[in-house]
């Protein structure tokens, strides 16, 4: 507790209370945080248990109880953003008067650094699996009805499978269902669906097993984590995205968010590095997006092209970057995001440094 108080003043430690009506139980959390929002609240309710995690800066507050009586799984989560109040409205299965909320479970009412909080997994149903390329698939999973979870732009989560008796977890970055006009897909419960673009490695440990999942099978999915903040895009005029292979995945939501929300953005340029033309993920969607939005420009670079490839060739290099990473206006605010194989990122960061870009100019997607 002392450690927590050292890091964080006592005033901001959240607290909770609860009240009931004939047919509902409401758990209220006072976060004492002004800019609360839906992405900071991750909650899971099952018949007998409630687990609600609230992110307050770098800390996590947890409500975790074995409920006195059964509730339905379709909980309502209400967030009063300005006052920082979060309410979980649970529907009672029986109209009984509850004497207490329930029994505390592990880490109930605790407030710890996010990095010290155990990852929580819930089972999600595989809804669809479609091919994006010869080795990469788009998986759509459905969150259980009692789960409230939104994955922030640039954040990843973990998928867990038991493989020959051992639990294996690997990180994946959710994408959108498509890049071009994603908001045209009407779906009443679209927030409950999460899309992943995952490359299957025949010699890999995790992905070949993932690829054997059938529609309707279940897979465990963790809470999101990540350090990217939307505020990094504030006032940005030039956004440069450098992606290698599936390092494209964090760029999907980022591209969509930046193009639809930034008032200052003048240019978004993406350089997408792949081995062959067949490896390029969502090539035609990226080309279509570039036609749709004049601020967006896409450049493909192949490291193992066929002879007839008319575009750029090679791996990430100082000459490619010095030509590409340019401000659209003298001294404009720039953000460069990079993601891909480790050596690709390491070299990329070095080249960017040589070109005078480091610190707040550069964001690197990693765990
Ligand atoms: P692995 O067992 O890790 O093997 C991968 C490849 O390396 C295979 O070809 C294998 O044969 C080879 N290999 C393994 N060990 C060796 C060795 N010792 N020597 C030589 N070769 C070896 N991936 C995605 O597809 N989509 C995403 O959205 C995504 N998001 C990610 C987000 C983050 C933050 C991070 C860190 C990674 C992300 N990844 C993503 C990668 C993902 O986590 C896995 O690493 C990937 O799916 C490979 O897992 P695997 O167990 O199937 O393969
Ligand atoms: P890949 O092997 O198909 O390579 C794609 C391109 O990356 C190559 O064409 C080349 O230009 C470049 N590249 C690959 N190896 C390189 C090297 N040694 N030096 C310089 N450039 C190199 O890529 P893939 O199989 O799709 O792998 C994607 C990688 O991205 C994985 O390692 C995955 O873990 C990582 N990833 C990370 C995140 C994250 O958020 N950190 C998200 C998604 C993927």
Image (cartoon, rainbow, N blue to C red):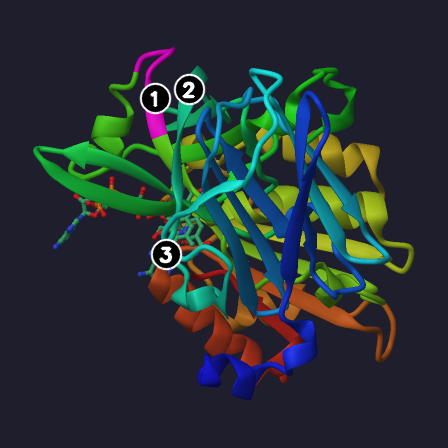
Residue under label 3 = 118
Please tell me in which quadrant of the rendered image residue 88 appears. top right
- Discs 3, 1 touching: Cβ within 8 Å: no
- Discs 1, 2 touching: Cβ within 8 Å: yes
Q: Residue at x 62, y 56 (%)?
A: 241
10 Å neighbourhood of mark 1: few (<14), some, or many (≥20)? Answer: some
Q: Give the overall secondary structure of the magenta segment.
A: loop
Classify residue 231 as left or right of residue 304. Answer: right
C-alpha span from label 3 to label 2: 22 Å
- Image coordinates for residue 120, horizontal then vertical, percent: 39, 46
10 Å neighbourhood of mark 3: few (<14), some, or many (≥20)? Answer: few
Q: Which mark is residue 125?
A: 2
Closer to us: 210 or 219? 219
Give the residues drawn in magenta, as a range: 214-219
Please tell me in which quadrant of the rendered image residue 181 appears. top right
Residue under label 1 = 218
Nearer-N-terminus badge (3/2): 3
- Image coordinates for residue 87, horizontal then vertical, percent: 71, 43
């Amino acid at each position: 507790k002392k450690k927590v108080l050292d890091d964080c003043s006592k005033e901001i430690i959240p607290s909770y209370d609860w009240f009931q009506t004939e047919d509902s139980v409401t758990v209220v959390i006072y976060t004492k945080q002004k800019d609360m929002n839906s992405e900071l609240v991750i909650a899971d309710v099952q018949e007998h248990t409630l687990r609600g995690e609230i992110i307050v800066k770098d800390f996590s507050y947890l409500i975790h109880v074995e409920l006195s009586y059964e509730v339905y799984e379709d909980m309502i989560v209400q967030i009063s953003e300005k006052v920082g109040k979060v309410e979980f409205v649970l529907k009672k299965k029986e109209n009984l008067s509850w004497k207490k909320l329930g029994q505390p479970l592990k880490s109930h009412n605790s407030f710890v650094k996010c990095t010290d909080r155990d990852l929580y997994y819930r089972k999600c149903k595989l809804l669809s699996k479609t091919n994006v390329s010869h080795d990469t698939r788009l998986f759509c999973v459905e969150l259980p009805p009692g789960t409230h979870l939104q994955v922030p732009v640039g954040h990843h989560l973990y998928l867990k499978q038991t493989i020959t008796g051992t639990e294996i977890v690997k990180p994946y970055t959710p994408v959108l269902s498509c890049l071009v006009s994603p908001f045209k897909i009407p779906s009443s419960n679209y927030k409950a669906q999460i899309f992943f673009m995952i490359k299957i490695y025949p010699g890999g440990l995790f992905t070949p097993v993932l690829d054997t999942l059938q529609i309707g099978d279940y897979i465990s999915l963790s809470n999101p984590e990540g350090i990217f903040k939307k505020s990094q895009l504030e006032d940005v005029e030039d956004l440069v995205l450098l992606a290698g292979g599936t390092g494209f995945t964090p760029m999907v939501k980022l591209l969509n968010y930046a193009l639809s929300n930034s008032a200052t953005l003048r240019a978004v340029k993406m350089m997408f590095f792949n081995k062959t033309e067949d490896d390029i993920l969502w090539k035609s969607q990226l080309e279509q997006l570039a036609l749709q939005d004049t601020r967006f420009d896409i450049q493909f670079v192949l490291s193992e092209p066929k002879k007839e490839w008319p575009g750029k060739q090679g791996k990430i290099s100082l000459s490619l970057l010095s030509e590409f990473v340019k401000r659209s206006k003298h001294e404009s605010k720039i953000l460069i995001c990079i993601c891909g194989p480790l050596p690709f990122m390491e070299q990329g960061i070095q080249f960017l440094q040589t070109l005078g870009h480091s610190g707040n100019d550069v964001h690197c997607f990693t765990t």
